[in-house]
Amino acid sequence: MDRSRLTRIASLAVVAALALTGCSSGDSGDESGPVTLTVGGWSLATTPEFELLAEGFQKSHPDVKVEVKEYDAANYDTQMTADLSAGSAPDVYPIKCLCTFATYQGGGQLLDVSDVTGGLDETVKSAAAPYTVDGATYAVPYREDGWFLYYDRDMFEAAKVDEPDGSWTWDDYAAAAGELAKAPGADAGTYTHTWASAVQGFANAQTADGQADFLAGDFAYLQPYYERALELQKSKAAVDYGTATTNTLTYQGEFGTQKVPMMLMGSWYIATLLAQQESGDAETFDWGFAPAPQIDASTLSSPVTFGGPTGMGINAGISDRKVDAAKEFLAYISGDEGSTALAEIGITPANTSDAVAEAFFAVEGMPDDELAKSTFSTRVIRPEVPVSANTPTITTLLNDAHTAIMSGSSDVPAALEAAKQEYANQIGG
């Protein structure tokens, strides 16, 4: 049996198992009185948003108790899929990665929540687009992270390099990285983390046909992004991939301890850096964030980056008497009240209304210059990968290509051609 057939059978098995799932955890469906909602989350010690939202919702909804069920962040989808199959999944659960949304939605494990999104801020409705199938919405985004350019003002000043001003193209970024590599104490001018998304995500978002070519299995559009990444390594303007993987470097350690003057990373790092500077795990220095570099000047007024929403959906196995409370919870987490609570701890909510933005930039230690504010408000966030049943398969084979290219075991054209051939073997076409 060929590999593509095995993959299809495995996918069908998952969908079938999900479709057969009954009620969610601890739900007999006939209780009366106060409602207890269970909500999924991960790494609660370092990811405070779940308990924060649960506590905030309970204050305004005293008849509803919210219990957060913790999952392992690295194995979240595997564990959640198992719980859904076993009928022990929480009533409300996050869609941790957009790349797996199709599995949950296609498996019939999410309720239609279009009536919830209809009453939310326009920015939330826009962020919910990837969760919409045939006109119906199956999850509500409560946060939306995009990749920004973080920069260390102190190291820029020491190297006598002009700070980003919102007009940088990739050529400007590469030139600055070369100059910044000479900054006192710097390991390199910039740090590109080892994830495939650190290269491919920008190509998928910024290249005109990137999303379509991704699904079609034509990966040539990735070539200029990889050639630039390799050139930065070769010139020692960026930390070498082999060094990063061999020494298990972390992006928090590279930027937070001033080993590099700038770094492209997701907006979730804002809250982490603020917390680490307060705890002493990161150095104390003046920093800012700016739009990601663009291909050319045509998108500078609305700079394009990649990322995506993190949403929550309602378990299709929830008892009828809990549905209204679950929808009220979704409305809360993406409404002004829940979004403001998230902004106050440095998380970038999907709701970017004026009130929420004001709360975000009032956080102690948050850069509040005009460039940071425009980066927050004018961001155009396109999905890291398009939503499709084939996305997990394509993502896996492109991860292999990424490792081959960045480690030097294959040149760029050969690795992308190999990925194209593997696409044909597994998906067809």
Image (spheres, grey):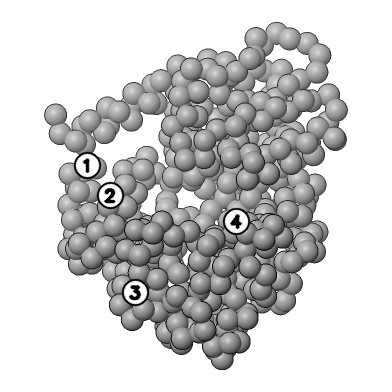
Instruction: Say which of marks 1 and 4 sits in front.
Output: 4
Asked whether the residues under the numbered discs 1 and 4 touch, taking CB atoms below 8 Å apart as contact, a structural biologist would say no
The x, y position of residue 158, in whole percent, is 58, 87
Q: Gap in Å between the C-alphas at discs 2 and 3?
A: 23 Å
Label whose residue precedes the other's in the sequence (2 or 3): 3
99 over 159 or under it: above or below:
above
Instruction: Say which of marks 2 and 1 sits in front.
Output: 2
Amino acid carrying label 1: it is Gln
Q: Residue 95: in sight, yes or no?
A: yes
87 over 241 or under it: above or below:
above
Name which residue lies at 71% across and 71% down.
367
Hey, which quadrant is residue 112 in on the image? top right
Asked whether the residues under the numbered discs 2 and 4 touch, taking CB atoms below 8 Å apart as contact, a structural biologist would say no
Q: How many marks?
A: 4
Q: How crowded is the residue under tag 2: few (<14 C-alpha within 10 Å), some, or many (20+)?
A: some
Amino acid carrying label 2: it is Leu
Q: Where is mark 2, residue-wise? A: 397
Q: Gap in Å between the C-alphas at discs 3 and 1?
A: 32 Å
Instruction: Say which of marks 4 and 3 sits in front.
Output: 3
Name which residue lies at 63% across and 50% down.
143
- Return the residue nearer the eye: 261 or 393: 261
The secondary structure type at the circle numbered 4 is helix
The secondary structure type at the circle numbered 2 is helix
Label whose residue precedes the other's in the sequence (4 or 3): 3
Amino acid carrying label 3: it is Gln
Q: Where is mark 4, residue-wise? A: 268
The secondary structure type at the circle numbered 1 is helix
Q: Where is mark 1, residue-wise? A: 426
- Return the residue nearer the eye: 141 or 114: 141
Q: Where is mark 3, residue-wise? A: 233
